[in-house]
Every structure is written in C-alpha cells, then in structure tokens.
Image (cartoon, rainbow, N blue to C red):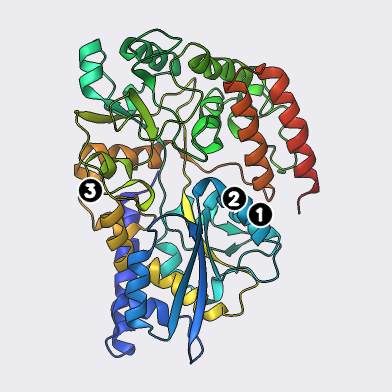
Amino acid sequence: MIDPNRLLKLDWTRRQFLKTSAKMAGGLAAADLLASCAQPSQGTTTLRFFRWQSDTLNGEIAAYKKVKPSVTIQVEEVPFGQLYDKLAVIMTSTNPPDIMGYDAAFTKSYAAVGGLLPLDQWMTPDQKADIIPSVLAENSYKGHVYSPGFVDSPVLMFYNKDATDAAGVSPPQALADAWTWEQAKAAFKKVRKGPASNPSFWGLASSTFGGGIPGFWLRDSQLARSAGDPNASPDSSAYKTFQMLSADGKSVDGYLNTPEAIEALKLYQSLYSEGLTPKVGTPNQFASGQAGFELNTIEFIDVLSGQIGVGGAAANPPAPFKWGVTPLPYVKTPVVFASSVTIGASGKTKHQAEAAAFLLFVSSKDQSLADTRHHGTLPPRVSVLQALPEYTTDPQRKIFVDALQQWGKPPPGTTAFTQYANLLSGALHDIALGADPRTRMNQAVSDIDQALQQAP
C-alpha cells in the first residue's frame, strides 16, 4: 500500500527538482524540460509510433510538436484485437517502429529479446521516484527501466443501479464488503431477464477486452488467482494458486492447475453454461442497457458519463440508467491485476535520444494531467494523483485507487509473458465454451512450461 507521507515527500522533491532545473534551463516549461533531458540530435526527425486504434497520445503528440517542431510523430495503428500478434512480429523485425504502445505485463518479455530500449540514462532519480512502485517494477527488467508508465488501472465491476434496485440487489460500496464470486453469481441470476437459454437482459456483460470474447487473461484469470492464498505455506497449493508461476519463472505446473484453481475455473465456466454471461462478444452491451453488471477499468466511468468514447471513438450520450462501481468479486483472496497499457521505445530505433525525449515528455506531470482529464484514466504518477482531488473524493474513482493500493498485484513476471498470456487466454476461452477445466488447463500448463523453459 502506498504511504501518503512518502507520496508527499516524493511530490515535494520532484517539484524542487523541476523548479531548480527550470531556473537552470532559463525558464523552460516542466514538460519541455523533461523532453530536453534526453538531448536529441539537431535536425528533422520522424518517429514512427505504433499503437492500437484509438486517440491515445493525440493530445500529447500535438503538444510535443509545439515544443519540438523538428520531430514528426508518424502514427501507425491496428485494431486492439490484433495488437499482440503484430507486436510479436515487430519484435523480430529489422525495421520496427520507434515507439510502441503495449501492455505493461509484456515489458519483461520484450526487453529480454532486445525489443525495448532501456531509459535509465535519460531518466533522473526524481522521475523514477514519481512513478507508483508497482508500475515502476512492472516496467523494469534486470535493474533497468524500459517505460515511464502511461496509465495503470485495475478491473472492477460496474452495475446498472436501476436493474439491481428492481431485483432487490445491493452491490457493496467498499472493498471490505466485497462479494465472493458465489455472491456475485447469485446477483447475476437475480437481475437476468428471460430464459437462461436466451436472456433478454444478461447478468454480466460480455468481455470488452482483447477480441471481445471470453478468456482474456487480464479480465478472467483473476478469478482463478483469487482462489489462492498468499499467506499460506509456500509449499501449499493455495499459495501456488495465488502466485500463478514458480519463483524461478520456469513453471506453472502446480500453479495454474491446482485443485483450488480447477474448482474456481468450474465456477467461471458456470457463468457461461448457466446463461449468466454471453459466450460471444456484444459491443456496448452494458452501456446500452442490456446487462446488469460489467467488468471494466476506470475509463469506463467517463464512457458511461458521455464524456469520452470507447477506444477513441466519438462519445455516446450518457447511459440511460443510474449506475455505480463495486469491488471485483473474489473466491478466497481479493486481488486485482495492477497492470495496463504503456509505451516504450524500440531497442532497434535509430533515434534513441529522440524517442526517449518523446517518452519523457508524454509521461511528464503536465501531459499526464492532461491525458488523465481527457481519458479518465488512473495515472501512474504520484504527483498527478495528488493534483486530482476527485481521485480521493469521488467514491466511484476512489474505489479504483483503493483497489490498486490494497489489492493490486502485478501479473506473473516472466520473460515469456507473451506465450504465457496467449496460452492461458486460449485455455480460459475454451473452458468458457465448455471444455473440461482440468483437462484443458493441464494442456495449457504443458504448453506454457515448454515456452517458459525456452525463454531467456
């Protein structure tokens, strides 16, 4: 959990650094100063920026053009569902983009194969200290920092208050009162309308992650992880279930397929087999009033409020119902993944200083503040969180901050996370569609172990 007193100290030291450095630089703006720290070469430079289809960093790109007119940012993008397949190709390419957007959980995988540029020589100690510790750790590998972080947000559960009120359901408002998954399942049943074989109103909306189908690791594997216990004996299956990976990062056998994990996966499967949530993706299902609950990140608050659209699309009108946020359910131990999208520079870029300068600019306090206000994200910077009182006063936002601080755990740290995530997501998808949980997970464990043992 983050110590508020430490945060205040970090904020003070960083502001003193910026103030002093600004004087030395002749009054440069803070964001411009951060960019200038990388000392890029003179002349005109074009940086290729690969991302998922969205308006991610559009505002920052425009702002950077004003302070660094000699640098052009050329955007290349693909649908989010194609992002990781494309990145797998990019990492082995001889001419990759200079800047890439990706999920921070993949940092170690990409860094291990030389796909990312370490930023240590361009980052000051104060800049590193301003990053939330779990974010800094996730974006580091073998003592080097590969990304300054961009956004960080756990997945919690939204609910249609009109539907829950009508069904006599009262979702908890505090982490201490969080539902178990069995309690959540009972709530899904109460709000569902129509027959289980073809509901007219679903208990839980379909996934909005990955390709919009069941199984995406970030959303769905948290249920199985929560069946474990980090306080149990390290040699117990309960402890290993929570860890999801051996300490040496080389095996998931006895971690993903424990008795506790398999029982949790049976519960997960029942959400689909009992008609509580769809087996196929349905865009905007919750926002359009077709489901009682939705698993999503903090940005969804502004989507439902009609302030932003999904993935950079035009905003829709505010949701035509009252809604709220409730903690993510759990089986035995509350947990949320402290992970989200980030940005990094290619390890093969020919413009290292320029790429580093751009990353430091877009992640600076001023730009992070602007992005947070525009997208409604949860910023990874201590100073930005302190500058936004709504993250401590607005209950719907505060519960996300509380969950990150009290329940947040990084995804399993392995240099083979690309294979780990893909194989785990595939198994979860098949289980949702009816595959035997034990048989399918044992198959996935065998495949993941093979990938882990071959990883750097």
Report the residue marked by disc 3.
307
Report the residue marked by disc 2.
84
Q: Position of residue 292 (x, y in %)?
A: 32, 22
> Looking at the image, is mark 3 or mark 1 earlier in the sequence?
1
Q: Quadrant of residue 160?
A: top left
Identity, as a three-letter code, of the amino acid under mark 2: Tyr
Q: Tag 3's secondary structure?
A: loop
Q: Position of residue 404 (x, y in %)?
A: 40, 41
Report the residue marked by disc 1.
88
Is 364 on the left or on the right of 304, as rendered?
Answer: right
Identity, as a three-letter code, of the amino acid under mark 3: Gln
Q: CA distance from mark 1 to mark 2?
A: 6 Å
Asked if disc 1 and disc 2 are in contact, CB closer than 8 Å, the reply is yes
Residue pictured at 64% horizontal, 40% vertical: 422
Q: Single out the residue that lies furthest toward the top.
A: 195
Residue pictured at 27% horizontal, 87% vertical: 27
Identity, as a three-letter code, of the amino acid under mark 1: Ala
